[in-house]
Image (cartoon, rainbow, N blue to C red):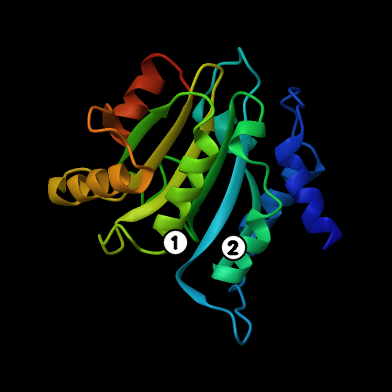
Amino acid sequence: MTSMVNKYDALKTNDDSGEEDGETRESKEMEKILPPVEVKPGEHRLQYTYCIWFSRRAPGKQATTQNYDQNLQLIGRFASVEQFWGFYSYLARPTHLASHSDIHIFKDGIKPMWEDGANKNGGKWIVRLRKGLSSRCWENMILAMLGEQFLVGDEICGAVISVRFQEDIISVWNRTAQDTLTTGRIRDTLKRVLNLPPNTVMEYKTHNDSLKQCTSQPSNPN
């Protein structure tokens, strides 16, 4: 368990060097060898296996697809309710993370990048939160996703909480941007799960548009 706790410590560091340290290299190796996650007798299996990723960009440093990929650290994988809580109890809450930190929870086999095969034709709903709300909203969002409350089949790819200086951003990624019925259902469920006021502004952005924006004027991939 010691090595696992050390992985969680990556979420609590403020290292802005941008260098790929041992933990990052180890996470890259974990990506290459991903055996099935064992669910022990008595545990409550989730419909999907999920991966927890962490990334942080040094403030003021322009983000590119390449350095974004290099900054991604695979923290761990879970396939049951009990395994999720085992990870979550050690994870730093969004309100305690440094600015420009991101936590990603995605289905196993889907990397939290626009170019991933499961994401390339999709998009994301974006909800901007004032400071102080992100931890509660993020937890509600995760539980809704793991509990299959969105009722859109295999459309949900994952979710991201992005901690920024003046606001925090929750985004939910789905596979098919052109499926307006599905994206509408995700929007409505997200409003209910996060208990958002009726006048809350939500934005849907396709990953193709994000890629174009990043190419013309580099910005954070989240």
* Discs 2, 1 touching: Cβ within 8 Å: yes
Category of crowding for the residue at label 2, using alpha-carbon neighbours closer than 10 angstroms: few (below 14), some (14–19), many (at least 20): many
> Badge 2 is on which residue?
84
Q: In the shown orientation, is residue 102 left or right of residue 178?
A: right
Count of all numbered marks drawn on residues in the image: 2
| Quarter of the image where one finds residue 38 | bottom right
Three-letter amino acid code of the residue under disc 2: Phe
Tell me if residue 121 can be seen: no
Q: Nearer the viewer, residue 139 or 220?
A: 139
Question: Is 210 drawn above or below residue 36 in the view shown?
Answer: above
Q: Estimate the spatial distance between the alpha carbons at disc 2 and disc 1, rounded to whole Å.
A: 9 Å
Quarter of the rendering occupied by the N terminus: bottom right
Residue 217 placement (x, y as % from top left): 41, 14
- The residue depicted at 62 percent of the width and 42 percent of the height is 54
Q: Which mark is residue 36?
A: none
Q: Position of residue 111 (x, y in %)?
A: 49, 49
Q: Which mark is residue 146?
A: 1
Name the amino acid, label 1: Leu
Please say whether residue 135 is visible from this viewpoint: yes
Between 30 and 92, the residue placed more toward the observer is 92
116 displayed left or right of 14 = left
Going by the picture, which residue comes out furthest to the bottom? 41
Q: Residue at x 46, y 20 (%)?
A: 219
For image coordinates 49% across by 32% down, the residue present is 133
